[in-house]
Amino acid sequence: VSRFDWSSIDTSHLPSSYKTNSHQEKELLQLADHFLEQYIHLCPDRKPLFVHPVNECGVQKFVSTTLRPTLLPFPELYYWSGCASFVCDYLIMEPLKCPITLPSSLYSPTTILRYQRGNCFDFTVLLCSLLIGAGYDAYCVHGYATLEMCSLDQTQEVCPLLRKPPEVPEEEDPNKYRIRYPIEPQSKFVLQQKVKEEEETEPGEEEEKEEEVEVEKPKRDPLHGLRVHAWVLVLSGKRKVPETFFINPFTGNHHSTTDECFLGIESIWNHRNYWVNMQDCRRGCKDLSFDLSDSICWEIMFSESNEPSQSPTESPKKDTDDMVSDQEKEEIDMSFEMPLSWVARIKVSYREYENPFSQGKKVILYNKAKLEKWAAYANGDGLVERVTVYADSDCTEEVEVKEWFKHREDLLYMREVNKQTQLITDYFRPGHPLLLKAHSYTSLEPETGHTVEYYHTARVDGLWKRFESATEITEYFMGREDFLHMRHIELGERDKEMQTAGIGTEANARPIVQIKEYFHRNPEKPADEDIEERIFMVIDDIIQLTYHLEVHDTIASKVVFCRVIGREKREDEIFLSRENSVTYKPWSSEKHKNMLHLYNLLWELREEQKLLKQQVRDSEAEMLNILTVREDEEANIKLSVSMYNTAK
């Protein structure tokens, strides 16, 4: 980002509190100077503290008074995650002029919001103001961090939108008496041979691997541990925060206080007080205690009681005995009520909140991935986020693209595109007129391979997934009363003569070759009456039934109805004989083996076959309608606007 000229900003319109100090503020600055004198005398090797830099009008202001606790009227900004994401999206990051020294100025949050840019201290003060206003026990932190964190380099990190959720370990059965099955035996000789093969790998391959590892490892930073950074500390307790954590204002990410990216802390402050860290930071922030009431770990600047505050001479430093006499001579009552913030009220309009990106969009580079963000309604198709995954670190070969949408009338909210197979998967929110949940395809042309998922609870037939290609249709069901869970249809080729004559696909439908149906076990029926698989070979005129097994059974009962050879098939005729029916029911009673029972069963199956044929044609018509509607929705994309959105 090009360097912004802060000296050219207009400060004439700013209130008088920006340009002058009140009597109370002047007294505050005197007390702060007195504290700094003692601090420098006791800790001459410590780096300078960030206490009272100048503001945009060139006036010295104490850092605690630069905080302006504010609760903005947006529901998302009542939570730390919403505040953090707003700040990192709304502002443009500017690096410090010198990475190892403190900035000479700290501008007000209102000015930073107006120009939408700032350094890490500007980010931190604005974010901390919002968090305190939302009720969090938040503090600004002045410390040291790694090069990647200070420079907002995320090229070594995994994109947050691509991170897989942590796997939940399976709970072991506490029953110590359960049967323990033997582990599958492994040959020791085979394992030894594998070890030998690994040891005999060519040295050239090992060198190449070492070179690759060296390339992936970041170079050592000569300024490691010296780079100044500012971030936010949120203590546990308020707003039911269970554990103390850090927030990096540049990214809005949550970090543990033991994160190795944070290398040390000099001081922290909020809108009421200022604390200096007196703990050893040679191991970063891992061993730090954040109990601010502990005067050994944290030296408070202004006593929070009416008693004189602890002088820095009481901290465990050298020459403690020599300084006791000085304390007795110059004991000062440091109890002080912090003056109100000199910063004007922080205001963010709805339009500014909805359009946080000053440059139109925001681009973030991750490890083998690129994230792009847009404001809502910035794109005509409702696109707000896009993640592009690459095969290499140079980001030249695209592997996958994920896109997120908002406010679309067709309720599309996410799209995945596999660049290698060109497979596109669309995901929909509940409420689509066709009850769509997901749609996978390579083309919106019919019979080119489509997988559609539905919100099955809203459908009467319980269908939750359907796959259709040129030769087959597979449907999956859930929660049906007849326990049907899958149906597979095989289709033949259309009549070529009718195709050449220009007859449409509706009149020249694909012939149905076979229909298979699979059923779950119905516990209310005997197993030899509960069908597990039902096959209708339509062209061959064969019907085959396979029944469920009981617990003790080994062979399933079956019934097969075949066509009589040499006999012409007549419509609505049911012909049954010993020749065209094969029954194998070893576990059933005699009543299930008589011809009348089989005749009634065959009659029911013929009626079922007619209904299934019609259902297949209905499924084909439904898929054609889905493709037509989706093609029209993509050609005429419409974005919905809430009636409460007055800005739109």
Image (cartoon, helix red, strand yellow):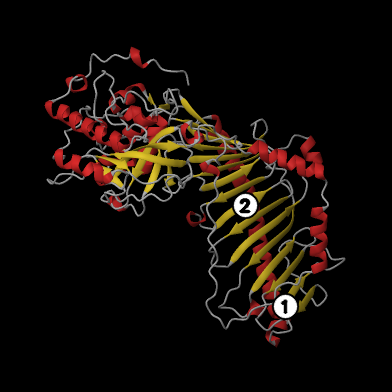
Label 1 – label 2 distance at C-alpha: 30 Å
Amino acid at pointer 2:
Arg
Residue drawn 34% across the image and 23% down it = 104
The quarter of the picture where residue 60 lies is top left
Q: Residue furthest bottom?
A: 590
User: Looking at the rendered structure, which numbered label has been put on residue 213?
Assistant: none
Quarter of the image for the C terminus: give it: top left
Q: Quadrant of residue 445?
A: top right
Q: Which residue is drawn at the image coordinates 53% and 48% (left, top)?
A: 437
Q: Position of residue 50 (x, y in %)?
A: 32, 31
Q: Which residue is mark 2?
A: 466
* Residue type (three-letter) at the residue carrying disc 1: Ser
Task: Please indicate whether residue 336 sits to the left or right of residue 464 in the image.
Answer: left
Q: Position of residue 233 (x, y in %)?
A: 35, 43
Q: Position of residue 365 (x, y in %)?
A: 55, 32
Circle 1 packing at 10 Å, graded few (<14), some (14-19), many (20+), is many
Which of 414 and 340 lies nearest the eye of the viewer?
340
Residue depicted at 14% across the width and 39% down the height? 329
Residue 435, placed above or below residue 93: below
Question: Helix, strand or loop at disc 1?
Answer: loop
| Residue drawn at the location 48% of the way across and 21% of the way down | 1
Q: Secondary structure at mark 2?
A: strand
Q: Residue 564: x, y in percent?
A: 83, 68
Residue 444 appears anywhere in the view? no
Q: Taking 237 as reference, is 96 left or right?
A: right
Which residue carries the number 1 mark? 557
> Neighbour class for label 2 at 10 Å: few (<14), some, many (≥20)?
many
